[in-house]
Amino acid sequence: MPGVDAATSSSKMNSTVSPTPETTEYPLALIVGYVILYAVFFTVAFFGNIMALLTCYRKYRSSRSILLCYISSLAAADLLFAILSTIDVSYFFLKEWPGGNGLCKIQGTLIEISYTASILTLVAISHERSRSVRSTSLARNRSVAQRTIVIKILWIVAIVVCAPLFYGYATKEENGKQLCLNTTWGDSGRQTYYMLQAVLIFVCPLMYMIWAHWKILRVLQTHIRNTAGMGSVESKQHKVTKMLAVVTLVFFCCWSPFIIIRALRYFYVYEGNEVWRLTQLIIFGNSAANPILYCFYSAQFRRSFKDILRCKFSLKTPKRRKTRTGTNSTFAYNVKHNSVRRVAEIEGLKDSAHNSSSTAFP
């Protein structure tokens, strides 16, 4: 990531001398492997997240699920990160910044915004799921329009938090090569900012999400025990919760090594390059992992992916079959009789459509 390479300086910790260009020569096999993995990650991340956005848009027109809005926010952040990462890869191979000072500032700031927006979105998802599972009536009392304000706010917060980086990043010529570095703040400024970011935008959200998902799973398990088994609604709720928990787990598994190594580099505890580059490749892979997880857990995504491959995908809302009660059902159940048990299940599904954690997504 641009700016982050400022930590490659071999100067002492109390020095603000500009870092020298990276001169490490990597083995050919390592470079080839890096290129292949990055090409796979970028392809999956780019097309997968576009598919996720199209699918969420199409489904949202009929279900109005707040969960789809959050998934769209996460997909947008992943797509932005994937596009911006191409400049980092060029930087890696050229060993020289491929653009000017303006691109250095914009790219360095936007890539941090995409990371911050991703983690804030995961926090918002965990909070919304926790509220909806514990009290569906409370969730229904808030309109979708009111709840989508949260998404706008979290992106604004991400922009505000990362805005100082626009000042910090700048190009500088070293040994005849132009580099994009974050040296404007000096060592103490960088160390203070990134440590605060690691604690407030990584560790604290991690602690909250672990607590939220633990509470969600406890409530669902209690409900399943009390109802003597897992019905169709509970099964879908459990599947959505499991998908979001896995997405959160993958995010932290991919980003934790990078956050740790970056902190060590800024404090000059570790100044190597091989592990550093590996952590960067892993966070690129996180943007590709999410669309795969959506498809693995969601039949809707799998159908949309097949439609795109067959050139049959359409943004038009698919027609919904009506139940015998005369209203559109959230899920396409084939109601074959009018038993009390079946009607009660349909009513429960209709309620869940207004829930912030609508399971129309899977």
Image: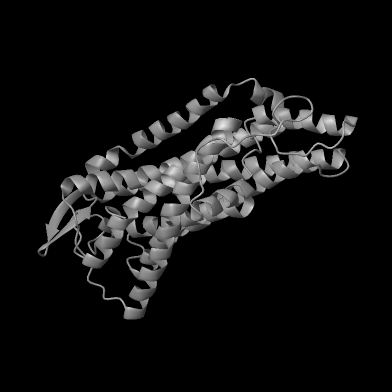
State the residue lying farthest toward the left: 176
Give the residue at x 89% y 29%. 340
Q: Position of residue 254 (x, y in %)?
A: 49, 57
Tell me the residue at 37%/42% (across/down): 113
Q: Is residue 19 left or right of residue 203?
A: left
Looking at the image, residue 112 lies above or below residue 256: above
- The location of residue 72, given as percent across then percent down, is 49, 40
Residue 260 occupies quadrant: bottom left
The image shows a total of numbered marks equal to 0
Looking at the picture, does residue 3 appear above or below residue 139? below
Relative to the observer, which residue lies in front, 128 or 252?
A: 128
Left/right placement of residue 107 relative to residue 228 reads left
| Quadrant housing the N terminus | bottom left
Looking at the image, which is closer to me, 296 or 21? 296
- The answer to whether 134 is drawn above or below residue 229 in the figure is above
Q: Can you give x and y, in whole percent of width and height, for residue 108 in the image?
A: 28, 48
Residue 340 in view, yes or no: yes
Residue found at x 47% / y 56%:
288
Query: Compared to 99, does 337 lie above or below?
Result: above
Q: Residue at x 39, y 31 (%)?
A: 156
The quadrant in which the C terminus is found is top right
Q: Is residue 169 visible?
A: no
Expressed as whole percent of the image width and height from the top left, the position of residue 234 reads 76, 41
State the image quarter where residue 163 is shown: top left
Is residue 200 found left or right of 232 in the rendered image?
Answer: left
